[in-house]
Image: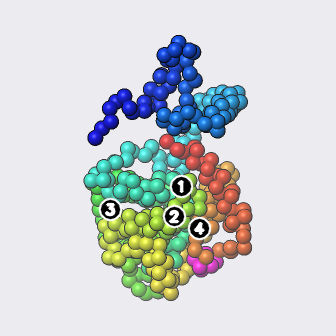
Amino acid sequence: MAQPATSASPPGGDRRRLADAPSDDGAAPRAAPPEDAPAGDAPSWDVLAGAALRQLGGLATAPLRVPLVAGQRLAGPWRADLRRSVRRSLGVPGEPPPRPARPGTAFLPPGGVARRVHGDLPSMVVGGLAALLLQTLHPLAMAGVADHSTYREDAIGRLRRTASFVGATTFGTVDEAEEAIERVREVHRRIHGRAPDGRRYSANDPELLTWVHVAEVHSFLAAARRYGPAHLDAADCDRYFAETAVVARSLGARWVPESADEVDAYFHRVRPELYAGHQAMEARDFLLRGVARRPNDRAVYACILAAALAVLPRWARAELRIPAPPLVDEVLVTPVARTVLGALRWTIKP
């Protein structure tokens, strides 16, 4: 049964107004209790002292806040121009569209882990580069890329198409995602041939679709955990693999790992089939060189490349014959990459 209104403690704002009102005996108004004081109780000394210190801290930092706010306002237009330039160079020329928030409308869960991972563009660029290197190790998948892809002549265009597909399936509506998936399936129908080892391949092969998907999401997640702003625990990783599995199945894969343990077991099973043939080594050399020409661009690409190599599985890096000196990734590459990607994140954050 509800208590009478007169017995209830007033909320914080009402407590302040009551405290400021004159007392019944005509004495001066009492000081208002701080926000974090327990309702109905006198504030303790540590609460009052904490409130005083916070006010003093605010006064002490006021001279620093003025130039900071002014600097942010002055940097606003420059930051917007730089953001557009960076997004164009990464193959994502437009600002991201509004994200559907209703579960029945969105293709992937609006509050899921996939959106947290794929929403950080800097770590996604690192993960995407790592995924390309890892995918070269499957001879049939690499043969399809070598025979039918224009990655040498139109690397940015290929990056843009891949980014568009990931964006549509992660942040798009059901209709947008299904339309993007159908476009990819249509392209896959035309990709088939014979690999250098004599085996026939098809881009619609369910096993190849699983390989490409696992190499991609494993790399995205590894980059997000090492360089991204969000903390992702073991349960988050399992949720990520489970959420993104629907994309591979929609493309035609029959079995897709849905947990970190299943991904590890899958890599263990397929490793005997993986090797770096001459097509893989040509793709590796192209990716290591990059397409940047200006010194500044080459320096940034070198940092992103080093960050991508650091998230590659050790066995994949060894197969690609890319040296991995002890402690270099942990002591040098990771701190530098986090700094560079942090600056990039500040630039492109909408």
Question: Which residue matches tag 1?
Answer: 230
Question: Which residue matches tag 2?
Answer: 233
Answer with the quarter of the image where residue 244 lies.
bottom left
Q: CA distance from mark 1 to mark 4?
A: 17 Å
Q: Crowdedness of circle 4 by 10 Å Cα count: few (<14), some, many (20+)?
A: many
Task: Please name the amino acid that badge 4 sits on.
Answer: Val
Discs 1, 4 touching: Cβ within 8 Å:
no
Identify the residue shown where x is 47% and y is 27%: 15
Q: Crowdedness of circle 2 by 10 Å Cα count: few (<14), some, many (20+)?
A: few
Task: Please name the amino acid that badge 3 sits on.
Answer: Ile
Which marked residue is nearer to the observer: mark 3 or mark 2?
A: 2
Q: CA distance from mark 3 to mark 4?
A: 28 Å
Magenta residues: mostly which secondary structure? Answer: helix
Which marked residue is nearer to the observer: mark 1 or mark 2?
A: 2
- Would you say 253 lies left or right of 327 here? left
Question: Which residue matches tag 4?
Answer: 311
Specify the segment rendered in magenta.
Answer: 315-321
